[in-house]
Amino acid sequence: MRIAASEHNENLRQLEHLAPIAFAFLLRFLTWEQALIFAFVAVLYAAFVSPRLFRVTQRPEEQIKGYSAGKLAYAFSVFTLVLFFREDMHLAAVAWANLSVGDAASNLIGRRFGRARLPWNSNKTWLGTCSSVFFSSLAGIVLLLWTEFPPHSGNWNARRGLLYSTTTAIVCSVVETLQIPLDDNLTICLAGGTFLRGLSLARWPSNWAWDEWITGLLVSAGTGLAALSLKTLTLSGLVCGVVMGSVVYSSFGAQGFLLLATFFVLGSLFSKIGYRRKQLEGTAQPDFGRRSARHVLGKGFAPLVAGLASIFFDSKQIMNVGFTAAVATALYDTTSTELGQLLGRHTILLTSLEHVPRGTPGAVSLAGSAVGFLAAAMIGFEAVLFKLISPIGMVCILLSASFSVHLESYLAAHGQSDNGRSGQLLNAFHTTVSMLLAMLFAKVYL
């Protein structure tokens, strides 16, 4: 079978992308300083050597510029992993496996054999993504056990290593499919490194508070059935909402559940206000604002993650800030969108600052941003009253929410979002960014 020159060059590029993983096996023998020097040499290679010796692996636009931003991002990501995982080189190796093996497998196998496209990214295939998960999991567990051997922690075992490698592979493979205007070598490094650091800090509970789970299930089911009868949820939305509510109640108590309920009630109300006008302008939520499973997961993914993470982390105060930030950001976004369409007279795109019609993806208005900020502040104030967070924690939340909502608008203006599945993925992404930022602020200032 004859392979086109462009495809042949892309295959060579992916092999060059895959080959450096062999150096990860040296992490078992190198000191941190030596590993850092190796990683810095890789940056120099990507900047000066590869563009001259391996021009065939460069894409046309890279040959014009004289360098490959993707290769530089790859090398810089490896350097960053080594730099920040000084005492945990086995974790750097797992993230490296996803960066190298997972990304290459997704490209090579998905491009050659993949047919069914992902609904939120037509450039990616299901086969490519599944291949990324499988091969990066396999490479991750091998490198994890190799670099960690002999184990220097008493509770280290292959089962926990399998958990580390597979869950990180899933996270990185999903992030790689998102249409974000940032090189995927950087996003994989950021997602994988952050997730692995979180796993390494997790405590494993010896027992479960079953009474809290049962209470949360009953309260969530009752609330969900009421929402279903009021036609604010679909059946699939009810199922997801009950699961989410149960987790939140068991992790953050009645206070956290009430915070989540505040978002849902106000978000549903704001969606219905001025619905006829929004319909005429083509900006209304479908089905009169009823939330299905994808809507619930889009805005509720980060609160759900915060609830699950709080089970495994002792830093209750920081987890409370992260959860509150996720809820506040979700309400900020919903309020600025739904009420901004009614109140905002002048809407602009953050990418170009040009005036655009209301309802344009990524468009923002001063009025919409103002009411969204007030809604987020209300969630923060409610959390302070419930003693979930401190006033300083509220400041952290408002900063992270403001940044993340406008980040989402910027990405949407780049054409990375729509009103369907990719839009909900972007909702999950920016609320998660807000949660992590708020937790980082809280770690520093609380």
Image (cartoon, rainbow, N blue to C red):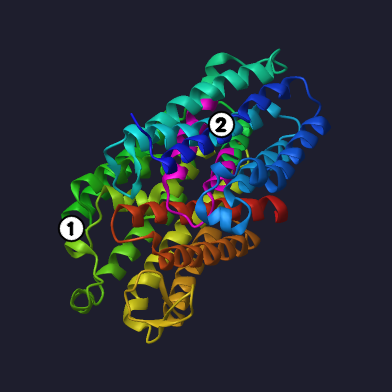
Of the two numbered discs 2 and 1 in the rendering, the one whose residue sits closer to the viewer: 2
Q: Quadrant of residue 153?
A: top right
Residue at horizontal 61%, vertical 22%? 144
Asked if the stretch drawn in magenta spans residue 355, the answer is no
Q: Say which element carries label 1.
A: loop
Q: Residue at horizontal 45%, vertical 52%?
A: 429
Q: CA distance from mark 2 to mark 1?
A: 51 Å
Seen from the viewer's position, the closer of residues 214 and 287 is: 287
For badge 1, the amino acid type reads Lys
Q: Which residues are magenta?
A: 164-192
The front one of 377 and 254 is 377
Say which quadrant the C terminus sits in: bottom right
Residue 187: % across, % down: 54, 47
Q: Is residue 184 magenta?
A: yes
Q: Report which residue position mark 2 lands on.
A: 18
Tag count: 2
Residue 171 or residue 243, whichever sits in front = 171
Lateral position of residue 132 relative to residue 153, left or right: left
Q: Residue furthest top?
A: 150
Q: Main secondary structure of the magenta part?
A: helix
Where in the figure is residue 73, as x and y percent of width and height?
62, 47
In primary-sequence order, the first of circles 2 and 1 is 2
Asked if 154 appears above or below 80 in the picture, the reply is above
Q: Which quadrant of the view contains residue 390?
A: bottom right
Question: Residue drawn at (73%, 17%), measured in percent from left and top?
Answer: 152
Q: Which mark is residue 189?
A: none
Q: Which residue is mark 1?
A: 231
Three-letter code, disc 2: Leu
